[in-house]
Image: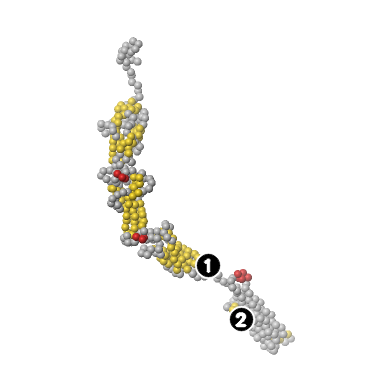
Amino acid sequence: AGGGGGGGCGNIGQGGRAGTRDPAGLSTVSGSISFTIGAGGGGSAACAVSSGDAGGATTLGSLNGAGGAGGMPNVGSDQGGQPGPNALNGIGAGTGGTGGGTNAPGSTGTSGAVLVFLDLGSSPSAPGSVTATPNSSTGAAQVSFSTVSAYPSVSSYSATCSSSDGGATRSASGLSSPISVANLTRGKNYVCSVAATNDLGSASASSSSFLMPGAPQNTTPPSFTGTAGFPAFKSPPEVLTGNPGVWNTFGLPDDTYAYLWQSQAGCAGGRTPASRLPNNQLNFTITANDVNNCLRLQVTGSNASNPSWGSNVAVSASSLQVTTQPAFTAQSPPVIADVGYFSGYSFAASGNRITYSIDNSAPLTGLPPGMSINGTTGALTGTPNPGTAGPWTYAVIATNASGTVSSTPKLLTVSDSVVDRLVITEQPVGGRSRLAAL
């Protein structure tokens, strides 16, 4: 605000006017903002030629206003004091009051427009360049990040590491980078985030996913080889050759593996360990106990020097059912057929995964043209072609990975469906002669 005007001759100047806040909206800010600016100047007590005293000045921060000078006499009339100067370091100030006339006080200066800019602050931005580096020795992750500037200043940084596959969530706080987050679950995948916090809020950013080193982690499942993928009980016994798969040891020594073969009856229901001695063998010898079962290999990886790290388990794909030597359970087909007609029949054999074929090796003739056997179902299909009338001999062969068996020889007599001429060789009733054709 401007100072008060100088007083007239014999009068003191009026006091400066108190500053005000403008705009009124600033009143919502906590605390008060007010400015009191300089007092008015005094008049010349003797009404001498000289002017009155200069107005007083009051300074508050960058705000400064002064009162006007006192009035001075003039021939024929009294001249009031001069208006007080404005001073607000380049920002609009109030106007000084007008000087008073002789024996009259000066007027009060007006309030100035004061522009006040306040930085009220904001929540911080998210930390940048968040990276998490796992420590295989300690089980901790070193979380690094770029700190941020904020008003109010950041009071703390909090790092939180969360697992996507069952690992424990862990957190730690600090005032700068890096922050160490301890006791992460080994062998689990993690993402770590960092939050910057001040009095007005927080913001966070996350690292890329990483795997916490620990017990060996399987990357390629176990497998095994046998009779072209078809395990069989046979003589000599078949041995399945196991492969433990590929495991990530994180560069740590003392990784160790345990092997367990599992058997599943009928390839349905729960799996149980296959009873074998010695146990914990990578290879597996098939016995009669395994017939009709499906087999698979389970591998468990751990660290012998650090059992507290736990273990990880991986299993192979299941085998098909273990076969045994085929044995016919149905081999009584029809023995007659006509050209263009056969009633149908299906051979059957036990032993799993049977393939059927016709044996036409001498002295067998095989099936008549137009007929065949379904190699998967054992069904005789088709009908005899014209011109195939007569006897046919054949056998059916059942084959799987355990061996081959042949049925007993079969006879199929085919008729051409044409009625033969009938000749009577005895005297017919009624007196007809012998050999009379009907």
Crowding at dot 2, Cα within 10 Å, few <14 / some 14-19 / many 20+, comes out as some
Residue 187 rendering spot, x and y as whole percentages:
38, 59
- In the rendered structure, the answer to whether residue 158 lies left or right of residue 292 reads right
Instruction: Tell me the kind of residue under disc 1.
Output: Leu
- In the rendered structure, the answer to whether residue 100 lies left or right of residue 135 reads right
Looking at the image, which residue is at 36% across and 48% down? Answer: 271
Residue 308 rendering spot, x and y as whole percentages:
36, 61
Q: Nearer the viewer, residue 438 or 275?
A: 275
Residue 67 quadrant:
bottom right
Q: Is residue 269 visible?
A: yes
User: Which secondary structure, mark 1?
Assistant: loop
Task: State the mark number for residue 391.
Answer: none
From the viewer's perspective, is residue 335 above or below residue 404?
Answer: above
Q: Are marks 1 and 2 in contact (CB under 8 Å)?
A: no
The C terminus is located in which quarter? top left
Residue 66 quadrant:
bottom right
Residue 63 rendering spot, x and y as whole percentages:
59, 78
Q: Nearer the viewer, residue 185 or 70?
A: 185
Q: Nearer the viewer, residue 368 or 284?
A: 284
Task: State the mark number for residue 200.
Answer: 1
Residue 137 rendering spot, x and y as whole percentages:
36, 64
Q: In the rendered image, which residue does mark 2 sit on?
A: 58
From the viewer's perspective, is residue 369 above or below residue 51?
Answer: above
Crowding at dot 1, Cα within 10 Å, few <14 / some 14-19 / many 20+, comes out as few
